[in-house]
Image (tube, rainbow, N blue to C red):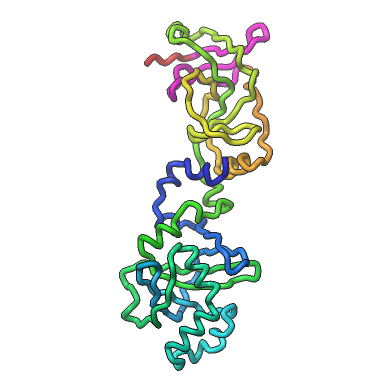
């Protein structure tokens, strides 16, 4: 599995709204300025002034605010006197100097972008939320802008693919986990006959390596991360549930070494689980060198 596939299978992330993703500190849109790979991220400080353009993206009208930065060299040179330039001249200068950025934005929003005019104060959409973003590449900031957000814009920029999966907000997100030592066949009669103090032999334990079952969805082992679904077998698991962070899952999915889990030690607490329900708790024991489960408590349906 790929890290994005793992994230998409986590309910809390899969159900995140576009606005929640846009608000995440991990929001980072991969893009290109010409041939240069770049990343679009939220800006830190809202700019004091911008060159506001009335634009149309697809069939929607927006206000795009261009921030003065040295990367837009010709616009930067006339910035103090831009108000003195005729509107057609100023628009032509923006199209020439910022053309690669406008193409980047058009690609990111997947809609044709057209400059309609210089925006007046009245043309700005006061009722719309504003995005302030910076686009950075190897050379630093290559563009900085503001844009009013509509549901269509949020839908494009608020996708899970627009999150930086290396960010600690994502990597540090924790999900439930338990160690599964074996999955065995057991009849209803076997379970019905099990009483506290009984011992259930587990010849299967040790024939395959233990694995971690994370979020009730993933199987994590030295082989990597795979989709997991409960197949109804009787599962021999660690008694206590734990947590694992998504970063560990991502690393395992990308082939980083995952340490092989050890078998339980003598008297280590275990539980028997079937269909997501704990049916017995007890301990790991050995009988004549054979692995077994010693039941301390049995739970009837």
Vertical side of 41 occupied by 4: above or below: above
Which residues lie in the magenta part?
Answer: 267-296
Q: Looking at the rendering, in which quadrant would you find the N terminus?
A: top right
Vertical side of 131 occupied by 116: above or below: below
- At 53% across and 72% down in the image, what residue appears? 101
Using the rendered image of the protein, determine whether residue 138 is visible from the camera's viewpoint: yes
Q: Position of residue 204 (x, y in %)?
A: 60, 15
Q: Is residue 48 left or right of residue 255?
A: left
Nearer to me, 72 or 250: 72
Q: Position of residue 29 (x, y in %)?
A: 52, 60
- At 44% across and 76% down in the image, what residue appears? 65
Using the rendered image of the protein, determine whether residue 49 is visible from the camera's viewpoint: no
Q: Is residue 17 left or right of residue 226?
A: left
- At 61% across and 25% down in the image, what residue appears? 210
Magenta segment's dominant SS is: strand
Q: Looking at the rendering, in which quadrant would you find the C terminus?
A: top left
């Amino acid at each position: 599995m790929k890290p994005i596939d793992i994230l998409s299978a986590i309910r809390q992330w899969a159900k995140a709204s576009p606005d929640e993703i846009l608000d995440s500190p991990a929001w980072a849109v991969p893009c290109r300025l010409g041939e240069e790979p770049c990343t679009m991220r939220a800006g830190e400080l809202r700019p004091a002034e911008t060159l506001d353009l009335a634009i149309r993206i697809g069939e929607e009208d927006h206000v795009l605010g261009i921030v003065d930065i040295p990367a837009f060299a010709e616009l930067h040179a006339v910035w103090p006197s831009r108000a003195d330039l005729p509107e057609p001249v100023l628009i032509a200068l923006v199209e020439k100097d910022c053309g690669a950025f406008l193409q980047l934005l058009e690609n990111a929003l997947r809609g044709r972008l057209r400059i309609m005019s210089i925006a007046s104060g009245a043309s700005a959409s006061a009722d719309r939320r504003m995005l302030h973003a910076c686009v950075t590449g190897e050379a630093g900031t290559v563009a900085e802008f503001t844009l009013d957000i509509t549901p269509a814009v949020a839908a494009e920029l608020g996708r899970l693919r627009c999150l930086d999966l290396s960010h600690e907000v994502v990597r540090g997100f924790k999900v439930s986990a338990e160690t599964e030592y074996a999955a065995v066949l057991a009849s209803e009669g076997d379970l019905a006959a099990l009483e506290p103090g009984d011992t259930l032999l587990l010849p299967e334990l040790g024939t395959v390596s233990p694995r971690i079952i994370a979020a009730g969805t993933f199987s994590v082992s030295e082989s990597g991360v795979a989709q997991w679904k409960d197949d109804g077998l009787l599962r021999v698991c660690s008694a206590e549930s734990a947590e694992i962070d998504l970063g560990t899952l991502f690393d395992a999915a990308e082939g980083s070494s995952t340490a092989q889990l050890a078998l339980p030690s003598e008297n280590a607490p275990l539980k028997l689980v079937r269909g997501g329900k704990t049916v017995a708790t007890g301990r790991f024991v050995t009988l004549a060198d054979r692995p077994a489960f010693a039941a301390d408590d049995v739970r009837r349906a």
